[in-house]
Amino acid sequence: MLTKDEKKYLAKISASKRASVKPFDPKAKETGDLIVKKIEEKLPTARVLFMGATALRIAGQDDIDIYVLAKQKNFDKYLPTLKKLFGKPKHTHKTFVEWKFEENSYPVELYLTELTGTH
């Protein structure tokens, strides 16, 4: 059973969009690890998570998903450094900021996102 938000998300995806699943690529994992390292060197107190299929070393879309977790009130502490490292964000929302770019020919989605729950 899909939630209301999940249905809204799926409704925004074009019917012509195709997803492809590729075998795990160790070079994509290395690229993701380097991005995490770059963030941690500049923001040593940040909580950085490398997630998704590439991080898990399993087949997937051969992309890199990285999350920088912070309380929303602290976004301003992280934004200048993340902008220097990765440029202008693609989207800025109340609870997250999103970058999309390529690194070593791999698509990267990077989020500065609200720290919630027990993270």
Image (spheres, rainbow, N blue to C red):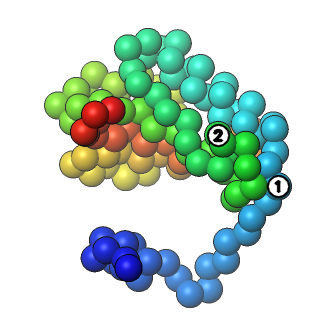
Residue found 48% across the figure and 14% down from its top = 42
Q: Residue 39: image x %, image y %?
A: 51, 22
- Quadrant of the frame with the N terminus: bottom left
Residue found 34% across the figure and 41% down from its top = 113
Q: Earlier in the sequence, mark 1 or mark 2?
A: 1
Q: Nearer the viewer, residue 14 or 21?
A: 21
Report if the CB atoms under discs 1 and 2 are less than 8 Å apart: no
The answer to whether 45 appears left or right of 114 in the picture is right
The answer to whether 5 appears left or right of 49 in the picture is left
Q: Secondary structure at mark 1?
A: loop
Q: Secondary structure at mark 2?
A: helix
Residue found 37% across the figure and 72% down from its top = 6
* Residue density around tag 2, few if under 14, some if 14–19, many if 20 or more, within 10 Å: many
Residue found 81% across the figure and 37% down from its top = 27
Which residue corresponds to mark 2?
55
Where 35 falls versus 19 (above or below)?
above
Q: Residue 41: image x %, image y %?
A: 52, 12
Amino acid found under the numbered disc labelled 2: Ala
Which residue corresponds to mark 1?
23
**Extreme bottom residue here?**
15
Q: Residue 28: image x %, image y %?
A: 75, 40
- Quadrant of the frame with the C terminus: top left
* Residue density around tag 1, few if under 14, some if 14–19, many if 20 or more, within 10 Å: few
**Extreme front residue here?**
1
Amino acid found under the numbered disc labelled 1: Pro
Q: Residue 29: image x %, image y %?
A: 72, 36
